[in-house]
Image (tube, rainbow, N blue to C red):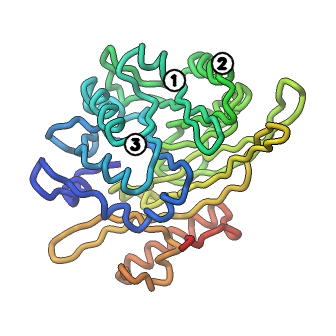
């Protein structure tokens, strides 16, 4: 997310040049090591001032360049802030992401683009992956034709899932912007939607919107041939970066999952998964404010060679990690970053 203080902290030349690379510098090694790194972009990139935060998120184009620097490959853009810069904002956001080499889906310039390029198909390391993305609402900001924003409508999702299955991907991954803000447990609507999506053929659902961490749950679904397959949903990964100050919104999870294929039988399945807690740190020095996403494991002993946390911030980070760890029962969590 991009609240006003984040925009101000990144500003180098007023309204013209912004540097967001420090935001991601400490988490970059974790993101870069993924074969495919995916995020929800919950701002618009309108291409011109005014740049602002809540309630209408309008961030400078330089943010996209910094996200590529961080190692992200795929950005989904269907969320409740998709229309914050109206139709031209939808279009310019898509253009900027394409110019920066991202795969993108969830919002579209027009119906033809959606018909041609949705579901998003990504080929990577011998895998064919289908990505779908939906949002519960757009904050009553109406979508301006000809642009399109995928909203959560069961009939639409089922129709799109039929298309995805006909494309015969190895995995179908659905990114859902859903749930109730600031609630640590998923609600019945999220449960009902996940059941429907899995029964329609999805393998993995990744959720966003609540701004706090919600449960990660495995289940099995019956397939057409009466066999069962494992599926997994992360109801909400919390906040990666924002300026939110409500309880439990100062961090989230980086979630990693292995996708596996047996080349002899040409069967695919979800493999091991891990998740790393991250925390939003606001560094203040010499009148300057800098936002950082910190992988907690690399900073909890406060011995990082490039950054030492003040005692108050270190305590806040450890409190977040302890409470969210208890919430998710992360006692056996893989927390160590690879060198």
Asked if residue 300 is positioned above or below residue 320 in the image, the reply reads: below
Query: Within the image, what quadrant is residue 155 found in?
Result: top right
Front residue of 120 and 246: 120
Which numbered disc flags the more N-terminal residue, 2 or 3? 3
Residue in the image at 28% along x and 44% along y? 54
**For numbered disc 2, what is the local secondary structure?**
helix
Structural distance between the alpha carbons of marks 1 and 2: 12 Å
Front residue of 40 and 244: 40
Q: Which residue is mark 3?
A: 41
Asked if residue 204 is positioned above or below residue 253 in the image, the reply reads: above
Q: Which mark is residue 84?
A: none
Please identify, in this view, whether the residue under mark 3 or under mark 1 is nearer the observer.
1
Residue in the image at 53% along x and 60% along y? 33
Query: Is 247 on the left-hand or right-hand side of 292?
Result: right
Q: Which residue is mark 1?
A: 118
Residue in the image at 55% along x and 21% along y? 153
Query: Within the image, what quadrant is residue 207 found in?
Result: top right
Pointer 1 local density, CA inside 10 Å: few below 14, some 14–19, many at least 20: many
Q: Which residue is mark 2?
A: 162
Pointer 2 local density, CA inside 10 Å: few below 14, some 14–19, many at least 20: few
Front residue of 242 and 122: 122
Structural distance between the alpha carbons of marks 2 and 3: 26 Å
């Amino acid at each position: 997310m991009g609240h006003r203080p984040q925009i101000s902290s990144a500003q180098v030349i007023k309204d013209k040049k912004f540097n967001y690379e420090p935001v991601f510098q400490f988490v970059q090694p974790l993101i870069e090591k993924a074969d495919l790194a995916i995020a929800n972009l919950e701002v618009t990139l309108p291409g011109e001032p005014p740049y602002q935060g809540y309630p209408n998120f309008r961030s400078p184009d330089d943010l996209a360049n910094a996200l590529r620097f961080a190692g992200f490959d795929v950005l989904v853009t269907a969320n409740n802030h998709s229309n914050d810069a109206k139709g031209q904002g939808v279009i310019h956001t898509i253009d900027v992401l394409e110019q920066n080499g991202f795969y993108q889906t969830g919002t579209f310039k027009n119906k033809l683009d959606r018909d041609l390029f949705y579901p998003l198909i990504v080929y990577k390391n011998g895998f064919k992956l289908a990505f779908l993305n939906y949002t519960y609402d757009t904050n009553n900001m109406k979508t301006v034709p000809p642009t399109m924003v995928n909203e959560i409508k069961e009939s639409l999702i089922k129709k799109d899932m039929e298309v995805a299955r006909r494309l015969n991907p190895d995995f179908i991954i659905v990114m859902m912007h859903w749930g109730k803000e600031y609630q640590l447990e998923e609600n019945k609507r999220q449960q009902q939607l996940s059941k429907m999506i899995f029964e329609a053929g999805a393998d993995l659902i990744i959720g966003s919107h609540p701004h706090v961490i919600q449960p990660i749950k495995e289940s099995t679904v019956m397939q057409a041939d009466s066999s069962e397959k494992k599926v997994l949903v992360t109801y909400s990964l919390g906040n990666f970066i924002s300026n939110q100050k409500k309880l439990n919104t100062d961090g989230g999870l980086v979630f990693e999952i292995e996708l596996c294929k047996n080349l002899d039988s040409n069967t695919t399945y979800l493999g091991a998964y891990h998740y790393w807690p991250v925390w939003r740190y606001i560094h203040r020095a010499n009148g300057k404010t800098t936002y950082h996403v910190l992988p907690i494991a690399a900073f909890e002993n406060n011995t990082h060679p490039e950054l030492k946390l003040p005692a108050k911030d270190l305590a806040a980070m450890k409190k977040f990690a302890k409470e969210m760890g208890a919430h998710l029962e992360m006692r056996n969590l893989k927390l160590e970053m690879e060198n």
